[in-house]
């Protein structure tokens, strides 16, 4: 399929302050153990891993919607080009849910 060779990596992945603080709390509470703990720099390790996952654009590639994997221009539900943001997406990482937005500028992690 053509999507296999498609270069659809997202260039930037940024974390909001709320997302960083929430992730640090999840690590402290042992929600990402044994891979990410306070003893092994777990918060920064988890941030780097989440960045790598999100840079690969985990949105569905077979979606009929306009904001599917690899789309560089974000569209509203009415089909118009959005100024910056679209709907948020979520995925599970260990035992926590990561919420993120994809915009024309990259990815922003909203909450963990």
Image (cartoon, helix red, strand yellow):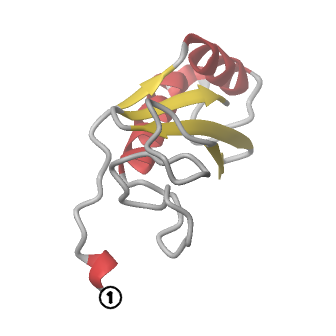
Q: Residue at x 63, y 14 (%)?
A: 18
Q: Is residue 38 visible?
A: yes
Q: Residue at x 59, y 51 (%)?
A: 78
Q: Quadrant for residue 27, please give it.
A: top right
Image quarter hosting the C terminus: top right
* In-image side of 63 versus 5 (left or right): right
Q: Horizontal and vertical percent for residue 87? A: 62, 42
Q: Quadrant for residue 13, please give it.
A: top left
Q: Is residue 14 above or below residue 64?
A: above
Toward the viewer: 24 or 91? Answer: 91
Image quarter hosting the N terminus: bottom left
Q: Residue at x 53, y 27 (%)?
A: 42
Q: Horizontal and vertical percent for residue 47? A: 47, 30
Q: Quadrant for residue 65, please give it.
A: bottom right
Q: Horizontal and vertical percent for residue 61? A: 47, 70
Q: How many marks?
A: 1
Q: Residue at x 56, y 11 (%)?
A: 17
Query: Mark 1, residues whose alpha carbon is within 10 Å: few (<14), some, or many (≥20)?
Result: few
The residue tagged 1 is 1
Q: Is residue 81 above or below residue 56?
A: above
Q: Is residue 23 above or below residue 31?
A: above
Q: Horizontal and vertical percent for residue 106? A: 36, 36
Toward the viewer: 64 or 62? Answer: 64
């Amino acid at each position: 399929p053509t999507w296999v060779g498609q270069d659809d990596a997202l260039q930037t992945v940024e974390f909001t302050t709320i997302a960083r603080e929430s992730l640090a709390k999840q690590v402290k509470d042992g929600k990402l153990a044994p891979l990410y703990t306070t003893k092994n720099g777990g918060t920064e390790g988890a941030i780097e891993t989440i960045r790598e996952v999100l840079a690969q654009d985990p949105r569905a590639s077979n979606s009929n919607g306009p904001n599917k994997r690899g789309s560089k221009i974000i569209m509203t539900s009415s089909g118009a080009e959005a100024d910056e943001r679209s709907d948020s997406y979520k995925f599970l990482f260990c035992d926590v849910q990561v919420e993120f937005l994809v915009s024309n500028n990259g990815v922003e992690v909203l909450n963990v």
